[in-house]
Structures are given as C-alpha cells and as structure tokens.
Image (spheres, coloured by chain):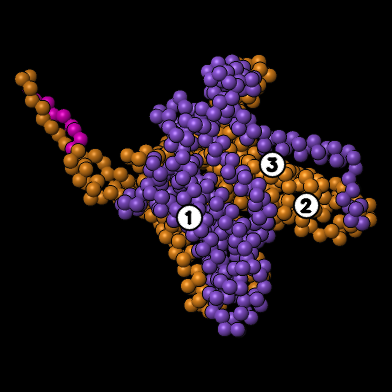
C-alpha cells in the first residue's frame, strides 16, 4: 500500500489516539510540574478600644486573580514528585537516620501514602496472577471435556464475572461478604465470633480484595486457554497414547508446553490490568486499609472544587513508569517476533 | 483413535463434573443472589438478625404486605432518575461502537495491507497506549477540558472512550484482517478499484464476523466504564455505572441503598443478554487476540 493511501486510512484513528491518549500523557506531565497557587496572605490591622492587633488573613481577591491568571498554578519542577505524598525522599532519609532496625525503617516507609499504595498494588498484582493462571487452565481443561450440548451454557456461566464491570462485580460480592450478608453472617456463625467481619483487619480486607481479583480475572484466563486448547495438535497426543502415556502425562508433557506462549500473554495482560486496580476498592469500601496508585489519582481528582492536578499528574507519571517496567518483556518479545517474521 | 483420546474414566468424569459445578456456583451464584435480593427490602437483604430473612422475606412481608416487592425498581427508575442514566448509557454505547468501528476498520485495514516497517511501530505504540491506566489519562484530560469548557457533556466522553478503545480495536481487527487473503483485494485493485473501494466493497462484506466481535468489545468497554464517565461527566449526564456509585455514596441518596441493588440488576441484565446472544463472537475475538499476543 502506498504511503499516501496508508496515511489517509490511518489518519482518523491515529489522530484520535494522539489527541486523547498521547497528549493527555504530556498534559499530565506538565501538570505534575506545577502546583496549586498558594493563597496570598495579607496583614490586616484590627483596632478596637484596647489597641491594635495585626491579623494575617487570606486575600481572597488577589488569590482569585492570581488563580485566574495561572490556572495551572505555579511552576514547581519535580517538587511534587519528591513531596511527602509521592516519593518522599526527605522522609525516607529521616527514617533511615532515626530508625534503629531495618524493620522499623520498613514500617515507617510503608506508612507513607505512595509506598503504601505501591505495596498494595504490587501485592494485588502478584497475588492474583498465579491462581488465575492455574484456575483458568483447570477450568478450561474441564470444560473442554464436556459434551458439546452442555458447553455453550457452561461457558456463558463461567465468563459472567468477567463481563460485568469491576465496580458492579465487587459490589455484588461485597453485599454477600458484608457482615450482614449471607456469606459474612454464615462465617460469623461458623467461627462463633459476632465481630468477625471483612473490615475487622486490614489483612482480611486485602485477602477479600485478592479473592475478588481472582474471581474477576479467572474467566479471562479460562477463555484464552480454552481457545488455545482447540489449537493443540492431535498427532503428538495420539503418539503419546500409543506409547502408553497416562492422561496426566499427556497434559503435562504435550498440552502444557504448547500453551506456554499463551500463558505468558495472559500473565502480562493480567499484570497490566491488575496494576490499575481501583474500582474494587470503591466497591468494597476498602479505602481505609487498601489504597492503590490509581485510587490515589482518583482521590486527587474527585473533589470538583479543588482538584489537585499537580499531585494527580505526578502519581500518574509514576504509575506509567511502573507500567513501562512491567511491559518491557512483552515489547522485547514482540520485537523479536516481528524480526523473525520479516 | 479419536474416540480413545476423548475417552475418560468414570472417576475423571465425576471429579470433572463436581469441579465444574462448584466453579459455576462460584461465578453465577452472586448474580442470582443479587437478583433475588433486589426484590426484598433492605432489612431482609442486609439482615442484621438472620440471613435467612433474605430467603423468607420476613421484613418485606411486614413492610409491604408481600414477600417480594418491586419498590426499589420503581423508585430508582423514577425518583432516582435511573431512566436518564440508562438513556445516557444507550447514547454513549451506541455512539462509541459506531465511531470506533468506523475508525478502527479503516486503520486496521491499512495496517494489515502495508508492508512498510512503520506499521510495526504504530502497532507497538497502540500496545503501549492499551497499557495506560485510564485514570492516568483522565488526570490529563480534566485540566484542558475545564479550560476549553467541554467538561461534563456526553460528546466529550464519547470521543474519549472511542480513543481509549482504539488500541484494542486496532489490534483485534488487524489480526482479523490478516486472515483475509491479500489476493482478494489485490485482484480488485488490478480491476481498477481504488484502495477505498476494495476496502468498502470487497473486504468489508466478508469481514462482518470480525467487525461484530470488535463491536461487541467496544460495547462492553463503553457500557461498563466507570473511571472515565465518573470523572468526565457531570451529575445529570451520569451513565449507569457512576449513577450506581452515586446511590451508594452520597447523602442525597442515603437510605435508598436498595436502589443500588436494583440498579445493579437493571444494568447487568441487558449486558448478560447481549453476551448470551453473541457468546461465540466474544470467544473468537479473544482467540484472535491470544494468537497475536
């Protein structure tokens, strides 16, 4: 296809992506270099019969004017990145000096908002992915052995958790797990502890969120594995059967190696998608004990009157760096594939 | 031979069936439970005293005189203005699907037919864009949108959702177009068609399964979106998902917790029906994606 034709075909979609994905990233970056204008203070003298006092007051008019002139705020360089709510270099240095042991230092650092969120995000990512792969594979194998007439409805049932949006999915589970819901109440009876609830400890909340993550993501792994199972060549399996391999051996030495590339694909998509975990935190109302990077950004932007663009931008940039680190293996793999294809 | 590969021992069949039943229970039961509970009052669905009230409808009987009630549905659709939210969802979903298919087919066709190296870089850029968390993009939109005064309205959200959706649509359609033999449109070109004519009259008619799949995924994205719609729309223009979140959180709606439960059912039911109807396309779409990586 000549360059010119190609250009006109790709223009609409390219423009949409550049304008609404490329530029916002740049815009986020610019915002992250700025910080909200400070309020201008002025001294006012209040005189009463007992003498004069100087009070410091916010000069609303001047502040408003300055804000209108500079809606983005003042330039702050990388200041927002290193402040207490983000990378918090000063706090870490101080903690390093003041703490007597590594564990104390770790406690202080992991209580800083950014590191707390990062810890949860990473824990969620890496706790959800392995069970998802294993469960998805087992479900795919099981459903693959079903008779054809039952397959359709079983697949439909099995993919429902993936079809609903995370917010609705987590709400639906939350209403059951909640201490007044069916599962929550049953667990209380089972353990004979009326105070046992999802919100009882941060550990329990984290576990609940991770279970939700597995519930929500497994159907995706299942569908991809199921599709890939249809492409497994039958000849080696037949050969193995003649050689006397058991069913388990056939799965272990023929099917699984065939599915390796698909599994890496699922792992990377899972890591990428779970890295942006955010809606379940809202659905489970778990903001108190579990914050993720995306949730931090949402929190900065939620207040319509005073949005913290700078802070949100900085967290966004740090999140993108995290994603880039996760994504490097895929990019390298795709590049290699592309080179061999040529 | 075929029969021997697929012959399973009774033991295996039993274990297998039990496992599938358990798995289906785990994935389907929460939805059935919510559907059931949405016809009860709050005191039953979230019962402090005894969860079996949710089954018997004890408080529902006391409060309404019957064991099931549609009060939450009627109230949320009228008083809670859920009808407006669902109208908005229909507008947004329909527009997003149409526009993103239009842009996506054009782009993916060009990508699948060009042999130059830059196609690779465009696809890689799309992959990177696909990985961007939506909320980081939203944080980039808000400020310029406020300045341009286009925040809060539906068209802005539609275009944003289309753009966010493009990378995935492009990859999906690209892998579908790759399966259509090049000879087909090349012969059309020799016969004197322009590229656009070949695309429009030769390729599109045989591509409808792929387009349907891509459309289905666009629909799910637009229908399910929370991040973009919650932050880019103002209260009146909320689509269903942010509306449900609003029922949960704000003081305005407190005491109407059951509205959220019934709205969840109202929002999920049409989605499930569509998925039931187009299940095969959905799975073939994911396969296409899996093969390409």
Q: Which residues are magenta?
A: A51-59
Circle number at residue B95: 1
Measured from the top left, where is residue B216 in percent x and y?
59, 53
**Majority secondary structure of the magenta segment?**
strand
Pick the residue in front: B244 or A6: B244
* Residue A162 is one of the magenta-drawn residues: no
Quarter occupied by residue B170:
bottom right
Chain shown in purple: B
Inspect this view and state whether residue B136 appears.
Answer: no
Label 3 environment density (alpha carbons within 10 Å; few <14, some 14–19, many ≥20): many
CA distance separating discs 1 and 2: 42 Å
Mark 1 or mark 3, whichever is nearer to me: 1
Which element is circle 3 on? helix
| Nearest to the observer: residue B57 or residue B146 | B57
Dot 1 falls on a residue whose secondary structure is helix
List the residue tagged with mark 2: A256
């Amino acid at each position: 296809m000549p360059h010119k034709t190609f250009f006109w075909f790709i223009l609409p979609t390219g423009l949409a992506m550049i304008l609404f994905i490329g530029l916002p990233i740049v815009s986020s970056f610019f915002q992250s270099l700025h910080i909200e204008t400070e309020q201008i203070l002025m001294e006012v003298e209040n005189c009463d019969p007992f003498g004069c006092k100087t009070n410091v007051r916010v000069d609303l008019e001047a502040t408003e004017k300055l804000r209108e002139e500079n809606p983005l705020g003042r330039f702050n360089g990388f200041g927002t990145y290193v402040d207490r709510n983000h990378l918090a270099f000063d706090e870490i240095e101080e903690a390093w000096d003041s703490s007597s042991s590594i564990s104390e230092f770790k406690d202080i650092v992991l209580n800083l908002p950014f590191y707390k969120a990062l810890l949860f995000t990473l824990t969620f990512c890496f706790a959800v992915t392995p069970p998802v792969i294993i469960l998805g594979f087992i479900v795919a194998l099981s459903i693959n052995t079903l008779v054809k007439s039952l397959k359709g409805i079983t697949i439909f049932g099995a993919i429902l958790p993936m079809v609903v949006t995370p917010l609705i999915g987590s709400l639906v589970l939350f209403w059951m797990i909640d201490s007044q819901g069916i599962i929550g109440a049953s667990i209380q009876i089972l353990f004979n502890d009326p105070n046992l609830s999802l919100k009882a400890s941060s550990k329990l909340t984290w576990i609940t969120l991770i279970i939700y993550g597995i519930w929500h993501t497994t159907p995706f792994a299942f569908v991809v594995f199921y599709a890939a199972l249809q492409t497994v060549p039958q000849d080696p399996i037949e050969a193995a059967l003649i050689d006397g391999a058991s069913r388990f051996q056939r799965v272990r030495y023929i099917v699984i190696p065939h599915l390796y590339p698909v599994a890496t694909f699922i792992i990377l998509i899972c890591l990428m998608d779970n890295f942006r975990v955010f809606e379940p935190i809202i659905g489970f109302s778990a903001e108190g004990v579990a914050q993720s990077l995306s949730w931090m950004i949402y929190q900065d932007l939620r207040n319509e009157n005073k949005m913290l663009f700078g802070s949100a931008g900085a967290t966004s940039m740090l999140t993108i760096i995290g994603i880039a680190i996760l994504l490097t293996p895929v990019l390298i793999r795709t590049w290699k594939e592309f080179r061999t294809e040529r | 031979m075929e029969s021997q590969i697929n012959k399973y021992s009774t033991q295996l069949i039993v274990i297998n069936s039990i496992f599938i039943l358990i798995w289906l229970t785990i994935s389907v039961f929460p939805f059935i439970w919510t559907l059931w509970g949405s016809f009860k009052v709050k005191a039953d669905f979230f019962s402090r005293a005894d969860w079996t009230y949710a089954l018997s409808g004890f408080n529902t009987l006391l409060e309404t005189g019957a064991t099931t009630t549609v009060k939450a549905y009627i109230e949320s659709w009228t008083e809670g203005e859920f009808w407006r939210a669902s109208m908005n969802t229909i507008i947004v979903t329909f527009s997003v699907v149409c526009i993103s298919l239009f842009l996506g087919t054009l782009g993916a066709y060009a990508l699948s037919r060009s042999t130059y190296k830059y196609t690779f870089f465009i696809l890689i850029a799309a992959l990177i864009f696909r990985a961007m968390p939506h909320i980081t993009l939203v944080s980039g939109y808000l400020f310029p949108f406020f300045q341009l005064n286009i925040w809060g309205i539906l068209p802005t959200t539609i275009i944003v959702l289309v753009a966010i959706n493009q990378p995935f649509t492009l990859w999906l359609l690209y892998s579908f177009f790759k399966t259509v033999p090049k000879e087909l449109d090349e012969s059309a070109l020799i016969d004197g068609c322009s590229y656009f004519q070949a695309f429009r009259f030769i390729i599109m008619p045989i591509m409808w399964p792929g387009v349907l799949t891509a459309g289905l995924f666009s629909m799910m994205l637009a229908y399910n979106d929370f991040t973009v719609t919650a932050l880019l729309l103002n209260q009146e223009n909320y689509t269903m998902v942010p509306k449900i979140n609003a029922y949960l959180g704000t003081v305005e709606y407190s005491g109407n917790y059951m509205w959220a439960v019934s709205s969840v059912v109202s929002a999920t039911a049409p989605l499930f029906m569509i998925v039931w109807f187009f299940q095969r396309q959905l799975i073939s779409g994911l396969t296409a994606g899996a093969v390409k990586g």
